[in-house]
Image (cartoon, rainbow, N blue to C red):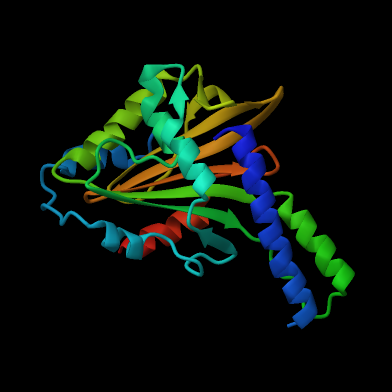
Amino acid sequence: MRRTTVRRTAVAASALSLALLVSACGADKSADAGPEAKGKDSAAAEPAAKVLSQAELDKLILADGDAKNHKVIKPLKADLAASKIATTDKAECKPLLDATWMRPLGSPAATSVRRVSTMPEKPGKDASPEDKLKAGLEALGGAVIMTDTLGSYDGKSAQEALAGLRTAGKACADGFTTTAGPDKMKYTKVTPASYTGGDEAVAFTLTTDLEGETGSAQLVTVRKGNTVVSFFAQSFAGKSEQPKDAIEAQLAKLG
């Protein structure tokens, strides 16, 4: 995700967080994870799963209220427009480009996307309005903006999608750059990370170069049957951790 997009999203999330905060004051009320082997060994034995429709995915993807202290919205039109034209300087990195730009991996039969942001905890009811505002602003400084992309696949396309992402992570270990119009995002390193969940999972930490400042982003992709969920997260603070609460809430919703 490019710096301009992060900046634009940060403004939107900040406004949303502050609005909620003011309301509260007024009311005063692995490369891949271990499951890789499991996924490969059990793929043939897994029963054929139903291919979900767009409408079904829209019901299964995270909704506002599904994850505590998270705000879920539909992607902004500007983000979707940029996603369509985003490119990378290395063809072998396309799966990473797709995963970081709200695009589904491989060729799903249907897909659904949401933007998710962490929200500050509400201060105690006895806190003064000034303390509540200060606490909210401090919490917002470490807020995480992420995308939740959910896809349903036919046959072995889901396994193939994760395999493609896994291969891209290895091929692009030394980094890659994404471009969408005038906006660029430079990743200097792609490092395997660990996440355990679903039938198999692939995770990476992407080191970012934000106009000379080093940061990090997190990519976690999990397969459950022939459904694939992919989370890409960046923090306002520059360095981010895996958005485990949001991922676990999404996996729980998939059943």
Q: Which one is nearer the viewer's eye here, 70 or 34?
A: 70
- The percent position of residue 74, horizontal first and vertical second, equals 48, 56
- The percent position of residue 137, horizontal first and vertical second, equals 78, 57
Res 4 visible: yes
Total residue callouts = 0
User: Which residue is painted at 68% across and 37% down in the image?
Assistant: 238
| Residue 82 vertical placement versus 45 (above, below) | above
Quadrant position of the N terminus in the picture: top right
Left or right of 81: which side holds 8?
A: right
Left or right of 156: which side holds 15?
A: right
Quadrant position of the C terminus in the picture: bottom left
| Residue 178 vertical placement versus 103 (above, below) | above
| Residue 113 vertical placement versus 161 (above, below) | below
User: Which residue is painted at 69% across and 69% down in the image?
Assistant: 20
Left or right of 118: which side holds 120?
A: right
- The percent position of residue 243, horizontal first and vertical second, equals 53, 50
User: Which residue is painted at 71% across and 22% down in the image?
Assistant: 212
- Quadrant of the rendered structure where residue 36 is? top left
Res 30 visible: no
Left or right of 121: which side holds 151?
A: left
- The percent position of residue 158, horizontal first and vertical second, equals 23, 42
Q: Which one is nearer the viewer's eye here, 34 or 136?
A: 136
Q: Which one is nearer the viewer's eye here, 185 or 79?
A: 79
